[in-house]
Amino acid sequence: MTDVRPAKRAFLESRFAARKDLLYFENVAKHIEHFAGSKVIVVEVGVAHGGSIEMLARLLGSQATIIGIDVRLPNIDLKFWDDLHHVEGAGKVFLIQGDSCLPSTWDALRAQFGRPDIVIDDGGHTNHQQLASMTWSILHARHLAIVEDIAASWSQRFGNPHRYSFINWIYGIYRHLNESWVLNVGNTTAARTSEAWSRISSIELFPNTVVIHLADTELPTWTVLQNNGESSQQSGDVLPSFSSRFLSPSLVANCLNRIQKVGSFQRCMWLASVALGYLRWLGNWRLGFFSSLNQTAIF
């Protein structure tokens, strides 16, 4: 089990208020602790009372630069952050008042501090706020893009569940990454995925948090590495035919047996449900078939 004591200890030592789920220290903290003691630049969207910013500064050490962005900054004396850095050996903290949904905020941040290594979104919880902030995080962060409070995608308070919720956006990225592999594997001239998501190497979903791992540069096209081992003629995927999957004798016999045991009304309802199920399957199949012909990005 990952040692979560450094992050939790830094959190409990913070003098300003903050709230974190215990699972945060079990699942997410290990990714941040990896950068402790290095010249890391961390941006956190959403400062609130300042407790989480202080936790990051204490955890990552004096070589770290911690930048907090919020539309409303807490009234904290700047001398506190200077003493925290020079006296207690914590990271150097900067607070910027701005809207993380605007590209101008990120342009100004990069012009002043350079490219961040980690971006943590703990700001607004509406779909628009999380989507916009996460998009800029993926485009600007060097290694990690983290979004907290993703449970808002199921909260009616924030207009969810919704077709365009943040979690559906994450599902869409994951689907697109895999669809691009199916369509382009072995094709060294095809793009791995759309330009915006070409640096995503993996996505981790935790309770109330998502962690997106990013490559420093654009990842290469989909290419399969084949070794020189012997192959068996019996290996490989064996896909059953349409008739064996949907019209097998056992399935037909079972259906006929059930039809004979029910009344006429139930028989009609059952046949109607079977017909609707078949039409639904046929519609999904047609949709998947025609969408596979289109190799352009979905975003």
Image (cartoon, helix red, strand yellow):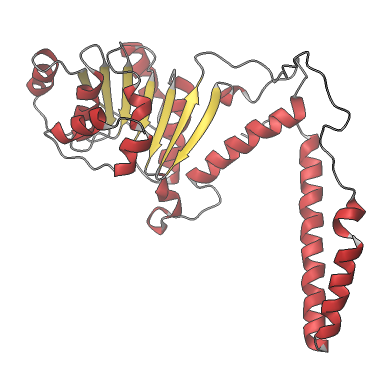
231 left or right of 58 in image:
right
Answer whether residue 73 is visible to the viewer in this image. Answer: no
Q: Quadrant of residue 18?
A: top left
Left or right: where 253 falls relative to 168 = right
Give the quarter of the image for residue 255. bottom right
- Quadrant where the N terminus lies? top left
Q: Is residue 13 left or right of residue 268?
A: left
Q: Is residue 148 visible?
A: yes
Whole-percent x, y for residue 254 in the image: 84, 71
At 43% from the left and 21% from the top, the residue drawn is: 141
- Image position of 275 with respect to 192: above or below: below
Residue depicted at x 31% and y 29%: 44
Q: Position of residue 76 (x, y in %)?
A: 11, 30
User: Where does residue 243 sit, x and y in percent of width and height?
Assistant: 92, 55
Tell me which residue sits at (38%, 36%) in the image: 27
Where is residue 155 drawn, in percent x and y?
41, 55
Pick whichever, 113 or 58, lies toward us. Answer: 58
Q: Where the C terminus falls, by quadrant?
A: top right
